[in-house]
Image (cartoon, rainbow, N blue to C red):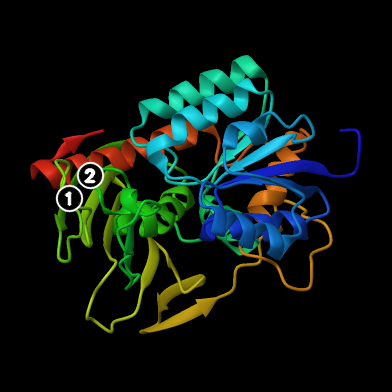
Amino acid sequence: MTNQFISLGVIGCGWAGCRAIESANATSRLNVIAIAERDPNRLAQAGDDNAVPHRYTDYQELLENPDVEAVYLATSPDGRLQQVLDTLNSGKHVLVQKPHAIRAHEILEMAAAAQEAEKTLQFCYFMRHFPHNRQIRSAVQNGAIGDLYHARIFGKFNSIPELNANSRWLHVYGQKGGSLGQHYSHELNLTWWWMGSPKPIWAFAAKHVLYPQYDGPEGAAEDYFTGILGCEGGKTIQIDCSRMSHSDSGSVVELYGTTGAITNGGISRFKDGGFIREPIDEPIEIDHGELPEEVPVFYYELNHFAMAIAGEVAPDVDASDAYTFMQILDALYDSAKSGEKVCV
């Protein structure tokens, strides 16, 4: 690079795009110099809040800016493939917000284009970048809870978006915008990654559409999703998630092994008739340097992207991991639609 910062462009100025702008500007490696958003009000608000000099309503104009070296794509997945291909074709690195695509095969097209362009392609799942979650993975992979066999996720978001031009994809079944794809795919990806990303074998799932706002041919997105994923070695992951529930029970993200479990961010063991807690003290895997006083939510992920561009670390999530995980989502959604067990 010719200067200290990598000049970043952000396409899409909804919640995720605005958090990406804040997070990138908080690092010592990235500087957001351009944004693109088709909604002029969101464009103006994001630009003014973050003093972004270059603003476009057409993302192609951002890609034509020669000063933009890398792009964060915070757009909806129904147009994601073409935008990734256009970004790579313009000679820029790209970080792709989740859901990464509509179907898994689109990830392969993105990967091929990145290889041809010789540019960095990274996919978002920001929870994997939190240092403590990386310490958990290291501890688990080093045998801290014995042989892994199951993970369990239960959570609720309790908010249904309005149906408008920006949120349409959140209401269409199969576009990965319901309770699983939009919200709890984070936790599903995290527990699968803690397990070591085992090869998926089968999926069986069901969905409930409780408050439909879309009546098109694809059907309405799910408000409640339940499923189980079977992986190589007999490992399983169970997920129940909702975007509107009247239950006041707490969320659960747990990983079970033969000698212990990961619960509430630490190790739990049953010993001598009672439960004991153990801290996780694995070394920090990646040095993110001096941190800001307040660390924005996407800070570690954006900083990792900059480090990957510089060749210091491998992209995470990389294309291979993103493709396999999208196969998992495809299988769960297909099973819930058909009512049949689906092989991945």
Determine which residue is flagged by label 2: 333
Q: Gap between marks 2 and 1, in whole Å?
A: 7 Å
The quarter holding residue 299 reads: bottom right
Q: Which mark is residue 205?
A: 1
Disc 2 and disc 1 in contact, CB within 8 angstroms: yes
Tell me where residue 186 appears, x and y as whole percent: 43, 56
Element marked by disc 1: strand
Above or below for 138 versus 339: below
Q: Quadrant of the N terminus?
A: top right
Element marked by disc 2: helix
Task: Residue at the far right: name it.
Answer: 3
Q: Is residue 226 visible?
A: yes
Q: Is residue 198 visible?
A: no
Left or right: residue 190 compared with residue 163: right
Q: Residues within 10 Å of mark 2 (few under 14, many from 20)?
A: many
Q: Residue at x 26, y 47 (%)?
A: 229
User: Which label lies toward us, 2 or 1?
Assistant: 2
Q: Residue at x 64, y 33 (%)?
A: 61
Left or right: residue 91 compared with residue 220: right
Q: Residue at x 33, y 33 (%)?
A: 103
Q: Residues within 10 Å of mark 1 (few under 14, many from 20)?
A: many
Q: Which mark is residue 219?
A: none
